[in-house]
Image (spheres, rainbow, N blue to C red):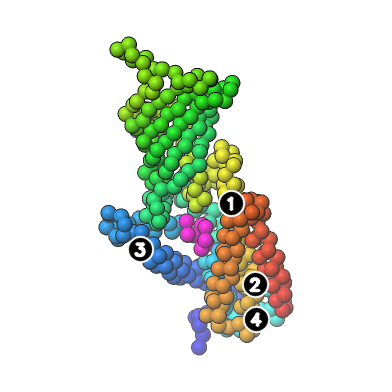
Amino acid sequence: MKIWNRPPLKWLPLKTIDRYLIRQYLVSWCICSFAILSLFCVIDGVSRLDRFLRHDQPLPLVILRYFSGMIPIYFTQYLGPILTLFAAMFTATQINKGRELIPLRAAGIPLPRILASFFLMALLMSGLMILVQETVVPSLKDEIRLADSYGRSRTNIQPEMVSDSLNNLIKVTSYLPHEKRGQKARIMSLHAGSGKLETLISARELIWKSPESGQPYWLLREGKKEQYHENGQKVPFPQPDGTVRLSLAFDELKLETDMRPVDLESSDNEIEYLSFRELRDQYKRRPHLTHLEVKLHRRFAFPLANFILLLLGIPFVMRSESQSIILGLSMALALGTAYLIFTEICAHLGNIGGLNPMLSAWLPVLFFGALGLTLFDGIED
């Protein structure tokens, strides 16, 4: 019994075969995307259920908001290449199971030409990953911040000290990205000549304000301001009643700085919602954050996984004995998982300084790419 209601592939023109394979690939990709993303969401949701329950909002709403922000991240950072591999191996296994590659190859059609449509789709999926990362994900920043706060074991991050262009050193003890609010802020400015402390501002809270008209700014709440001479003595503040004070208390104070929320958020290794331009600009502002350089290189390296996993997986279903769909998909899952694990290990080593940032992003491509080319070249003609 025929699996598909169509003539055998050997009777069809090559362009028609390409269109047919692309159509079957897209159907397989949609099915695999729904199945894998659903499974991934279930596993991730169950593992974070205790964190979801800590929030005051209804549980279904918390779950919906979490996954609406995280699914684009899943696709661009983890699952995109695996879905490409699953769809290609499912389609190739179906064709190989019907023994329809044999007459095509006997007719003198090279195997790379027969499989060209798969690599064309890998190119399109790489472009789709880049498009989602550069347009969709940055537009969902607020939703991703909120989703990240739902999924974390703790909602705040501990950012590193930020140095702005106005000679301020800004330290925030804890920062909540989804609220754009920091706690226990200290702002220090130094004398230009000696480098000694000139102004010290301490505040209970630091909040990012975005008025409808005018420039956004940081607002300090409930704090005090102190000034110092170069010799270390405090500068007194004259009062209207003729007295002086060594510190000036305030309820609210607008902070003069060019620091942005992303400067605090980028201290977090898990920040994933920046476009390439935003990531590059942030790295120029804070080059000491090694994980930003790793992410810059990974923007170019990771989409290539669509091709690399195809090179690794296709040889396993092109052999005559490989006619099991379950076996093919199992191999696809194993290869994709191995690639992701190796990629994450290299990225971690790059973040902590154990590997050069460029090497940490490109090593998985070089290693698995060479292995994939060797396996693909070894397919019997």
| Up/down of 290 relative to 68, above or below | above
Q: Residues within 10 Å of mark 3 (few under 14, many from 20)?
A: some
Amino acid type shown at disc 3: Leu
Q: Nearer the viewer, residue 108 or 281?
A: 281
Find residue 246 and name its label.
none
Amino acid type shown at disc 4: Arg
Residue corresponding to mark 3: 49
Residue corresponding to mark 4: 319
Dot 4 or dot 2: first in sequence order is 2
* Secondary structure character of the magenta stretch overall: helix
Q: Residues within 10 Å of mark 2 (few under 14, many from 20)?
A: some
Dot 3 or dot 4: first in sequence order is 3
Spatial separation of the CA atoms under disc 4 and disc 2:
15 Å
Extreme top residue here?
Answer: 242
Q: Identify which residue is drawn at 54% across, 75% down.
A: 329
Dot 4 or dot 1: first in sequence order is 4
Residue corresponding to mark 1: 351
Residue corresponding to mark 2: 114
Q: Secondary structure at mark 3?
A: helix
Q: Identify which residue is drawn at 31% across, 60% down.
A: 53
CB under 8 Å between discs 3 and 4: no
Q: Which residues are magenta?
A: 73-80
Dot 3 or dot 2: first in sequence order is 3
Spatial separation of the CA atoms under disc 4 and disc 1:
40 Å
